[in-house]
């Protein structure tokens, strides 16, 4: 299913399944935590994030301000001992994230084992979205720049306006097939000061430690951000979810190969 790259550019991967609401999830956490602990994820944390709830009322009144309240939402986090991989469980979703990606097969096996543990205890009824997202770093070697690694149609005006200071460039394409959605994005950054590698704003809830070879970074570098998902409510079935992930990963890999140059694939192989 997936060939291992010896110098893979992957620095973060997250997969998620959204399922029916379980408002009593807290009561299942002790059994889930014990099972995941024995499976190699002993570091357990519980955190709360604020979710903004806008209350328009049943009959909105003209010129009356809309009330807004912050509703705390629990996140149960189960990490491995090194903090490189782990699960995030909420009332309506479970995700698995890692910064030490090997190939797709072991990643998917680990996620499915965790999801099976939740299903065994909470008895999930349906799922309505599965998704997987990869972040790949383009860190050019001396004498190279990102144009050596990104396909020409991904570069925008990078390198075209040499009389102006480069800040960033973004190329994004969204495609669909049936209920499956794919977003293929390439971003070129410039950091004057050495610091952490860039993360998209909507992935602020990442809890794993990034590998040392990707941090810190400075200068001009690129990030390939590919997001593949499938929506639609289905009866909860682990086999169907696994097959959906395999299909999503296949098209995601096809997109990745089209976004980079043969030189890049040769460097990373």
Image: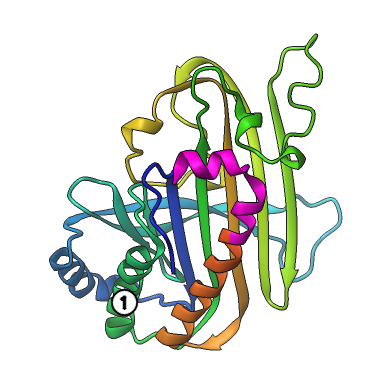
- Locate residue 203 relative to residue 47 in the image: left or right: right
Q: Is 189 drawn above or below residue 171 in the view shown?
A: above
Position of residue 263 measured from the top left corner of the image (x, y, whole percent) = 57, 38
Which is the main secondary structure of the residues drawn in magenta? helix
Closer to the camera, 34 or 146? 146
Q: Can the viewer see residue 76?
A: no
Q: Can the viewer see residue 139?
A: yes
Q: Residue at x 72, y 12 (%)?
A: 165
Q: Is 35 drawn above or below residue 163 in the view shown?
A: below
* Label 1 element class: helix
Task: Give the residue number, with chain letter if any, for mark 1.
Answer: 118
Closer to the camera, 88 or 188? 188
Q: Residue at x 49, y 24 (%)?
A: 141
Q: Residue at x 59, y 57 (%)?
A: 227
Closer to the camera, 57 or 140? 140
Query: Residue lying furthest right in this view?
Result: 62
Position of residue 109 measured from the top left corner of the image (x, y, whole percent) = 32, 71
- Locate residue 123 relative to residue 241 in the image: left or right: left
- Magenta stretch, residue numbers: 254-269
Q: Is 60 drawn above or below residue 205 in the view shown?
A: below
Q: Residue at x 50, y 18 (%)?
A: 142
């Amino acid at each position: 299913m997936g060939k291992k790259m010896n110098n893979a550019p992957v620095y973060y991967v997250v997969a998620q399944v959204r399922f029916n609401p379980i408002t009593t999830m807290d009561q299942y956490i002790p059994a889930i935590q014990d099972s995941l602990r024995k499976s190699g994820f002993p570091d357990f944390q519980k955190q709360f994030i604020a979710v903004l709830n806008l209350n328009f009322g049943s009959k909105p009144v003209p010129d009356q301000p809309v009330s807004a309240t912050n509703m705390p939402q629990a996140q149960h986090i189960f990490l491995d001992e090194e903090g490189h991989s782990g699960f995030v469980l909420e009332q309506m979703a479970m995700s698995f994230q890692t910064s030490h990606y090997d190939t797709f097969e072991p990643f998917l096996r680990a996620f499915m084992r965790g999801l099976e543990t939740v299903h065994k205890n909470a008895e999930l009824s349906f799922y309505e979205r599965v998704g997987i997202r990869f972040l790949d770093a383009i860190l050019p070697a001396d004498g190279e720049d990102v144009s050596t690694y990104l396909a020409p149609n991904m570069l925008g005006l990078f390198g075209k306006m040499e009389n102006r200071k480069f800040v960033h460039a973004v190329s994004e394409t969204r495609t669909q097939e049936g209920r499956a959605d794919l977003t293929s994005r390439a971003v070129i950054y410039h950091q004057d000061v050495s610091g952490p590698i860039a993360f998209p704003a909507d992935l602020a809830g990442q809890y794993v430690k990034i590998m040392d070879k990707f941090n810190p970074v400075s200068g001009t570098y690129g990030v390939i951000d590919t997001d593949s998902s499938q929506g639609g409510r289905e009866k909860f079935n682990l086999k169907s979810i696994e097959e959906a992930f395999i299909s999503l990963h296949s098209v995601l890999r096809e997109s990745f190969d089209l976004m980079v140059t043969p030189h890049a694939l040769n460097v990373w192989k």
